[in-house]
């Protein structure tokens, strides 16, 4: 697998691993990584949802029953909510705190593939695989998004890398045992992150690998008794406690959230079978010109006692296939395949890869030219000029598109010129360009993200909202505003994803719009002030029913109103 004649002159080889350039790159990378955790508003839906769940966990002190908007929320296990809550307890509430667990999970995955590549193949493969994963757009991007899928992927990477470390040729009995315990721990933590897929997917990969590689004896090396004991020690306590406190939990979680979610369109997240193909094309950027050759390299790996290339290929292909046939699809679902792809790409790059890196450089240049063309002809693009409110927000994004595009164009040309004589330097140029351009594009999304979250209206709402005041969410649920306001809402008409919890506690919402209008009038009669965040489509209907309200703030996504018709008197300044 190693080609000793293929020398490298770039930091990352064993002779230069501790060079100033290498460690300077690490420091700059980490500086950007941690800065970006707090550089943007929490964007609905996932970011606001999981931040608010952790905030409510801290506020209530209930670490067993997860709640969203004060309503029981059993869709996922609580590992990420626990981690976010601990972060809030330690560092307070904020954006970087809400993203710290996912950011660390992504960094953990980068470290794991680097360490595993070093132990299973050699040091150069380890460094290259870490570089590839750190610069892949999906991994670096979702590492800065508060979503369960990155936490899940970090723990599944532990399972994958533990298996590779424990089963590699030459591993001592102690190394085999420790590697497999890490694998079992990874599956347990993945299960506590997002449910049974944390166990089922790695298990299916192992079965497929056994058949494909005819490595039947691997089952004797899994340390099944110790591993299962560790798995159940980690996972069982919470499932028992939450089931005791909430008898309705087991059926909803195990049947509805797993079987029905996979086999039906109950969550309205369906998509065609090819849904994840464009996600993979964008997500693996800038390594699109190498990824398919790397997969084929896993197929062609020479037989040995344990075949890491083959298990990496099966891991990536099966998980991609699994989510492609599922009736529930979201872009981040395929994140767990990227560590396997990074290791396969690094193993492929051990050989001279002039054509593949040239193709990668050309694709990066094409991507950059496409972005440059978008900037150049932005006035002709309908989605940028679709309405008067969003037009300046899209236009504010254009300078970031320009900078990212210029980086891609320059790096594509630079890597093309380097690849013939300095292949590994070309790889690092592509990696830095992919990482920087991706982070710049994410940073530029902030005006649009803040608009989606509604944070522009925080000052206006906070000027009148008190902790005891009733805040209604009418015909929509704001996923981010409750976190920023430190205030839950009373749902009206639209249960959103809290339908099951509201079936258990129906007193926590108002299912009919007419009942809300009646309650609003009662509060006004009693001189009790309330506020509501309205779906703009429902506002005319409320006016038609004669409901009186004062608009505090509005945009095309929401109208925020108060039951107090007269605005508060301004404080008279004293001389």
Image (cartoon, rainbow, N blue to C red):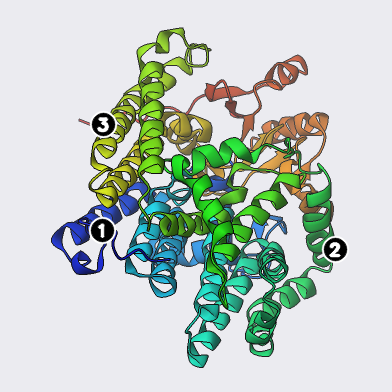
Tell me which corner region of the image, top left, top right, bottom left or bottom right, holds residue 148.
bottom right
Relative vertical location of residue 348 with respect to residue 563 in this rendering, above or below: below
Q: Which mark is residue 251?
A: 2
Is 534 displayed left or right of 261 in the figure? left
First-in-chain label (3 vs 1)? 1
Residue 400, how many percent across, how many down? 33, 28
Q: Residues under labels 2 and 1: Cα distance? A: 47 Å
Q: Nearer the viewer, mark 2 or mark 1?
A: 1
Would you call the spot at circle 1 few (<14 residues within 10 Å), some (14-19), or many (20 or more)? few
Question: Which residue is more in the foreground, 162 or 386?
Answer: 162
Q: According to the image, label 3 marks what residue?
A: 410
Is 276 displayed left or right of 411 in the figure? right
Picture residue at 76% right of the left edge, 14% below the top: 544
Callout 2–callout 1 Cβ contact below 8 Å: no
Relative vertical location of residue 269 with respect to residue 222 in this rendering, above or below: above
Picture residue at 47% right of the left edge, 62% below the top: 105
Residue projecting furthest to the top: 380
SS at mark 2?
helix
Q: According to the image, label 1 marks what residue?
A: 26
């Amino acid at each position: 697998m190693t080609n000793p004649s293929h020398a490298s002159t770039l930091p990352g080889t064993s002779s230069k691993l501790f060079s100033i350039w290498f460690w300077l790159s690490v420091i700059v990378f980490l500086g950007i990584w941690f800065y970006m955790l707090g550089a943007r508003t929490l964007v609905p839906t996932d970011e606001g949802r999981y931040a608010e769940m952790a905030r409510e966990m801290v506020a209530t002190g209930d670490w067993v029953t997860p709640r969203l908007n004060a309503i029981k929320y059993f869709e996922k296990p609580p590992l990420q909510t626990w981690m976010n809550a601990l972060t809030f307890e330690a560092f307070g509430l904020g954006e970087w705190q809400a993203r710290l667990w996912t950011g660390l999970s992504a960094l953990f995955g980068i470290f794991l593939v680097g360490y595993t590549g070093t132990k299973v193949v050699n040091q150069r493969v380890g460094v290259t695989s870490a570089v590839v994963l750190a610069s892949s757009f999906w991994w670096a991007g979702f590492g800065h998004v508060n979503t369960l899928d990155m936490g899940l992927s970090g723990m599944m990477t532990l399972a994958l890398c533990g298996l590779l470390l424990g089963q590699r040729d030459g591993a001592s009995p102690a190394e085999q045992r420790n590697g497999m315990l890490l694998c079992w721990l990874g599956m347990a933590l993945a299960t506590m992150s997002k449910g049974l897929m944390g166990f089922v997917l790695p298990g299916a990969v192992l079965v497929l690998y056994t058949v494909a590689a005819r490595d039947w004896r691997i089952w004797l090396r899994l340390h099944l008794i110790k591993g299962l004991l560790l798995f159940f020690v980690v996972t069982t306590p919470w499932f028992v406690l939450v089931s005791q406190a909430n008898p309705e939990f087991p059926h909803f979680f195990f049947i509805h959230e797993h079987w029905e979610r996979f086999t039906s369109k109950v969550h309205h997240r369906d998509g065609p079978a090819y849904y994840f193909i464009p996600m993979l094309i964008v997500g693996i950027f800038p390594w699109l010109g190498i990824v398919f050759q790397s997969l084929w390299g896993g197929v062609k790996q020479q037989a040995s006692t344990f075949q890491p290339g083959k298990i990496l290929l099966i891991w990536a292909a099966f998980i991609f296939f699994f989510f492609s046939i599922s009736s529930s699809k979201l872009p981040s679902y395929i994140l767990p395949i990227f560590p396997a792809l990074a290791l396969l790409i690094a193993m492929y790059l051990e050989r001279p890869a002039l054509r593949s890196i040239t193709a990668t450089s050309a694709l990066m240049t094409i991507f950059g030219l496409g972005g440059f063309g978008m900037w150049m002809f932005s006035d002709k693009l309908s989605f940028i000029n679709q309405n008067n409110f969003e037009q300046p927000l899209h236009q504010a994004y254009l300078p970031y598109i320009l900078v990212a595009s210029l980086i891609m164009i320059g790096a594509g040309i630079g890597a093309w010129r380097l690849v013939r004589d300095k292949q590994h330097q070309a790889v690092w140029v592509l990696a830095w360009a992919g990482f920087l351009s991706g982070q710049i594009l994410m940073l530029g999304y902030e005006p649009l993200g803040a608009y989606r979250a509604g944070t522009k209206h925080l000052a206006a709402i906070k000027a009148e909202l008190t902790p005891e005041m009733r805040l209604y969410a009418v015909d929509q649920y704001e996923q981010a505003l409750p976190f920023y306001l430190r205030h839950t809402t009373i749902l009206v008409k639209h249960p959103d994803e809290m339908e099951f919890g509201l079936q258990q506690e129906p007193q926590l919402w108002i299912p009919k719009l007419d009942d809300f209008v009646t309650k609003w009038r009662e509060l006004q009669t009693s001189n009790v002030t309330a506020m509501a965040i309205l779906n703009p489509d429902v506002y005319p209907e409320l006016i038609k029913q004669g409901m009186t309200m004062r608009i505090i703030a509005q945009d095309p996504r929401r109208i925020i109103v108060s039951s107090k018709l007269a605005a508060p008197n301004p404080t008279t300044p004293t001389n």
